Amino acid sequence: MTNYKIIFTGPVGAGKTTAISSICDRPPVSTDKIASDMTRDVKKTTTVACDYGTVHLSGNDRLHLYGTPGQERFDFMWDILTSGGIGLILLLDNTRPNPFQDMNFFLDQFQDFIKQTQVAIGVTQMDRKPVPCIDDYHNHLSKQGLSIPIFDVDARKRYDVSLLIKALLFSLDPGLIENND
Amino acid sequence: MDNLTRPVKIAALGMEQRTYSTLQLFFHEHCKDSYVLVEENSADISIIDMDGFQARRMLEEHKKHYPNQPSILISLSNEKTCDAVYIRKPIMLEALSSALLKAKERLQQPIAKTSTLKMPVTEIGSQLHMTTSNPEAIAPLLLNNIVHSLPKTTKPVKSGSRHFNQYQYSANFLTEDADLEHIDSKLAENFNPDNPIQVAKFQYQSEQMLQGYFQQAYFSALQKQQNVLLKGVWRPITILHKSKQLRVEKNFRHLYALSGMLFDKSDVSITMLDNSVGCEPGLHETVLPAEPFLWKLAMRTSRGRVPVDTNFTTPIKLIRWPNFTRTIITPHALRIAALWAKQPTSLMDTANYLAVPLQHVFMFYTAAVSLNFVVPAITKKNHSTVVALPPVKRHRYRKIFQNLLESLRNN
């Protein structure tokens, strides 16, 4: 059996745990704890180690989905988490005070990993706060000469998360063939 | 029979939803509701699409049940088999208006006469192109100027006459699914970009179509930071620049049905609005995001073609990914987008490298270029095109990625 992994990262409340849950075979192992710091203003629990889920592939291969803790004080784990990863999914919460700052922060933190692989970005909570819009994110990225897939995502919807992963895979290898893409 | 001071009731039989909606729009907008669409059993006049799969049987049944009801038969063929007013497709406005008047005249004749007399066959209109020489007098709406690519539609149509599901094969408009069926695939397989005759078949004049007018209005709104009103034969469309949204009639889907039609500039107006007005939708209006609307409109206008002046061999670069979770994904769109983001590639090379039908590349390109998501890859120094790089290398994990794609699809 060979194991591969995709990393889900992003700020607190962006929907990493939910996204992993919506895509993996069985309920993910979560290390969520009752939030005791400023995170509790955002949500009741927060991930302190990592989320973990799997997708079973044919031929006994398995894809592991790892979610990083959103809090920066756990960023020491990121390098360990990304080791051996095939790509990065960055989820951003549009209701946060400065989602562009979040985006820059995570793209910067994971820049070495992204250089070796690829990244796809999902913006969540756009139904609650539609501004900035997807176009604004692209404009922000284009100033840095980046063309990254960015989609409006509902982390609870398997279709949305699945599409984000597909965009990541095709970015890694456009020659991939998928029926009915 | 009354003297028809009330609206004339029309049954549209054997038509699919979009044709039905277009008729609805025509009666409402241009006939000022003097005609209304109703079910067959309460109609004064019937309009029957004779190119449907079982149209002849439907006509026989109709004549059996409603022998005195005047009929307008529309068809691609010249064949005339019964007493009716005939219109040849594609339907011209003049022809339709004239046919309606003739049918109305027949309707106003005493029933005894119409039931016993053989009515003469009347043919109206056989021209292939629309002219709006007098747009004030002639309703500037063409029901069908799509003269090629009859779709093999399979999707059931929800509303309209009771014949919808039974007679859904229509020679008029493409259905949602059939948008992906377009130009003859054999023609595309043998496409030679150096052959001007072939090139002409794969190109269209977007600027004379709703797509082009909408693009012009939308980008004017964004550039000038002002709301814009787009008017034509359709209900007014207000473009709200700040939110990148549209204010349109609730039944906005008829706009897509207009995607294949050419409109004269004189019939269309683009007006800059004061930003303080036009943001709140009216009672019969709704608000839509502009980008998915334009994407879909361009996709439907394209039907596997590209706008004129498109260069088939210049490498294309993707500068912005479409928001695929909220727009229609054309076939192979993710692969094409990923390729053009990674490495500028011409339309022809894209089809070869990805081994996908050329029409699918064209359709994605047309939708993407309508929103300026793609640009020709030009070097800044000499404005010459970038020489295409060697094909993107196969990823060492391709097999795993294939497995994962399969898994995502199956689950």
Image (spheres, helix red, strand yellow):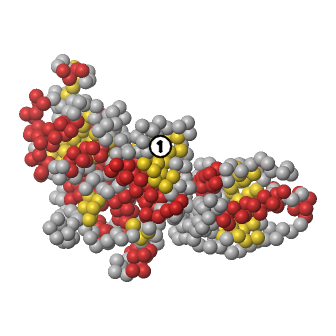
Quick one: B325 or B7, which is closer to the camera? B7
Name the quadrant of the C terminus of chain B: top left
Q: Which residue is mark 1?
A: B247
Residue at image point 44% right, 74% down: B201
Does residue A42 sit above or below B35 in this rendering? Answer: above
Q: Is residue B292 visible?
A: no
Residue B245 vs residue A84: left or right? right
Count residues near mark 1 (Cα–Cα under 10 Å), then give few for <14, some for 14-19, many for 20+.
many
In x, y percent, where is residue A131?
31, 37
Residue B331 vs residue B237: left or right? left
Total numbered badges shown on the rendered structure? 1
Residue at image point 23% right, 65% down: B377
Q: Residue furthest top?
A: A36
Q: Secondary structure at mark 1?
A: strand
In x, y percent, where is residue B232?
53, 55
In x, y percent, where is residue B196?
39, 80
Residue at image point 18% right, 18% down: A36
